[in-house]
Amino acid sequence: MLSAKSLFQEILDHDESFRLFCSIAAGGESQGGWENGRIAALVPESERALAPRIARHGADEDKHGRIFNALLNKRGLGPVVVPPEADYTMLLEQRGIGLSHDRLRADRPLTVRDVITYLAHSRVTEQRAAEQMRMLCRHFSDHPELGRAVRMISADEDNHLAYSHEELLRFAAAGHGRYVERTLRACAFAEIRVHRDVGLAVMARMGRLLGWSRVRSAVLAAGIHAVYGYERLFGWRRMVTLRMPERRDALGGPAPAAATEVA
């Protein structure tokens, strides 16, 4: 039976597919850590109160990258180079989503609209990350190798999502509602397409590593296209809706335990 659990179990049980999975995850998280660190350093004076929360977000992302690398090390594996077609963060930047790396490398303060752009990007991408980690928790929270890692990362992603909801609502209430709405929609539609493209690229690589039949690969590709079609028509709404989270100030305070203690 082909299910999310059986598919991921197959990837987990094979060293080379696990190596690719962890390398892609570690690369994306580490890139997010750098981006958040630069944004924290460049927030405008009027929004300096946000800087510690953005820095905490970046610290969490760095921690996640270290966790995935530690999982590789436990198996005696090293990371592999992430194929460009599977580089989620790079592909989003190429589509003009979020703040460009050129902008973040410049020692020039961000504007309020830049901060909103960053938060909208976080709102959409953290929705995806939180959903994926909840799925892994559902199936692997008690796994001896992955359990602690997926539980911690999932909790962090939920915090990041709550934080982006709360801050975007604050900016909308301050008169930036139209820009928030417009930016969220643009981010959501771009992310949906990039998620499809990356999913197809990763599944093709995994299929070659695991020796999948053409029929199985075609079924998985059809599933990815079907999810894309649903999200393009209806599912995008969950990525742009804003609700005040139950947990307020989710990124207040210092980052918790070190990655090596988790993995």
Image (spheres, rainbow, N blue to C red):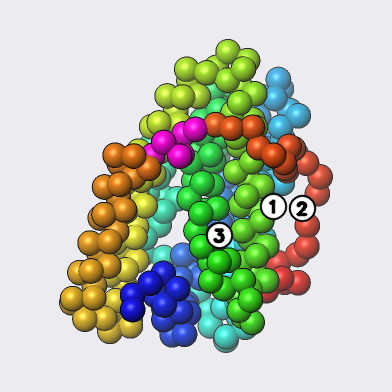
Q: Which residue is mark 1?
A: 59
Callout 2: SS: loop
- Residue at 45% across, 39% down: 238
Magenta region, residue range: 236-241
- Find residue 255 and name its label: 2
Q: Secondary structure at mark 1?
A: helix
Count the labels in the image.
Answer: 3
Q: Nearer the viewer, residue 108 or 11?
A: 11
Q: Amino acid at mark 1?
A: Ala
Expressed as whole percent of the image width and height from the top left, the position of residue 174 reads 63, 15
| Residue 157 at x, y percent in the picture | 61, 52
User: Which label sits in the foreground, 3 or 1?
Assistant: 3
Asked whether 197 or 229 is in front, the reply is 229
Residue 53 visible at all: no
What's the residue type where badge 3 is placed?
A: Arg
Q: Going from the N terminus, do you reach mark 3 or mark 1 first? A: 1
Residue 169 visible? The answer is: yes
Amino acid at circle 2:
Ala
Q: CA distance from mark 3 to mark 1?
A: 21 Å
Q: Earlier in the sequence, mark 1 or mark 2?
A: 1
Mark 3 lies on residue: 134
Select label 2 or label 3 by which is in front: 3
Q: Position of residue 112 (x, y in %)?
A: 59, 22
Quadrant in the picture for the N terminus: bottom left
Dot 1 alpha-carbon crowd within 10 angstroms: few under 14, some 14 to 19, many 20 or more: many
Q: Which residue sits furthest top?
A: 175
Quadrant assignment, res 256: bottom right
